Image (tube, rainbow, N blue to C red):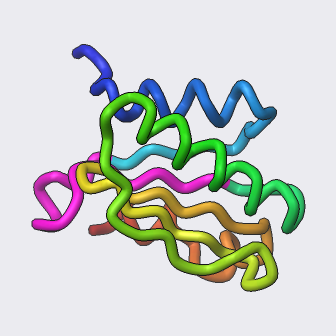
C-alpha cells in the first residue's frame, strides 16, 4: 500500500531533523476527525518547539492546511491538527504517562 503524501511529508521532515521515535497509527475507522495519528517522542523542550515549526512549514508548503497548534515547548506537549493527520510531539515522560501506543492500539 502506498503511503499517503501527508505521512511522507511528516516522516521526512521529522527524520531530516533527527527525530527517531515516530509512531504512526491508522485511526480512520476509529474517529471521524483524523485518518492518522502520529506520536513523536522528543528528547527535550527545544526539539518539541522546533519540530513543530518545521512540520507546520513543510505541511503548508505542500498544500496542507494546519487547522490548529496547541501547547508549547514549556508544556512538554504540542499537538498539530493537520486535518487528515494529528501530530503529537511530546517528551518521553509525557509519552510514557499517556501511553499513546497502548491507547491507539486498543482504540
Q: Is residue 31 magenta?
A: yes
Closest to the observer, 78 or 30: 78
The secondary structure that dominates the magenta segment is loop
Q: Quadrant of residue 91?
A: bottom right
| Outermost residue toward the top in this view | 2
Q: Position of residue 78 (x, y in %)?
A: 61, 70
Picture layout, residue 88 above or below residue 21: below
Q: Indicate the quadrant containing the N terminus: top left, top right, bottom left or bottom right.
A: top left
Q: Indicate the quadrant containing the C terminus: top left, top right, bottom left or bottom right.
A: bottom left
Q: Position of residue 21 (x, y in %)?
A: 69, 44
Closest to the observer, 42 or 64: 64
Q: How many marks?
A: 0
The residue at 69%/73% (across/down) is 96
Q: Is residue 39 magenta?
A: yes
Left or right: 2 in relation to 42: left
Left or right: 56 in relation to 45: left
**Residues drawn in magenta:** 26-40
Closest to the observer, 105 or 5: 5
The residue at 44%/39% (across/down) is 59
The residue at 70%/49% (across/down) is 51
The residue at 18%/66% (across/down) is 33
Picture layout, residue 3 above or below residue 70: above
Closest to the observer, 104 or 10: 10
Q: Position of residue 12 (x, y in %)?
A: 58, 24
Picture layout, residue 71 above or below residue 61: below
Q: Quadrant of residue 3?
A: top left
Amino acid at each position: 500500500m502506498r503511503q499517503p503524501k501527508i505521512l511522507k511529508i511528516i516522516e521526512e521532515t521529522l527524520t531530516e531533523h533527527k527525530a527517531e521515535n515516530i509512531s504512526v497509527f491508522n485511526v480512520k475507522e476509529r474517529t471521524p476527525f483524523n485518518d492518522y495519528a502520529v506520536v513523536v517522542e522528543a528528547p527535550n523542550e527545544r526539539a518539541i518547539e522546533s519540530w513543530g515549526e518545521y512540520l507546520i512549514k513543510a505541511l503548508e508548503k505542500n498544500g496542507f492546511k494546519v487547522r490548529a497548534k496547541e501547547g508549547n515547548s514549556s508544556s512538554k506537549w504540542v499537538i498539530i491538527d493537520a486535518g487528515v493527520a494529528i501530530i503529537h510531539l511530546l517528551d518521553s515522560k509525557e509519552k510514557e504517562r499517556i501511553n499513546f501506543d497502548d491507547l491507539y492500539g486498543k482504540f
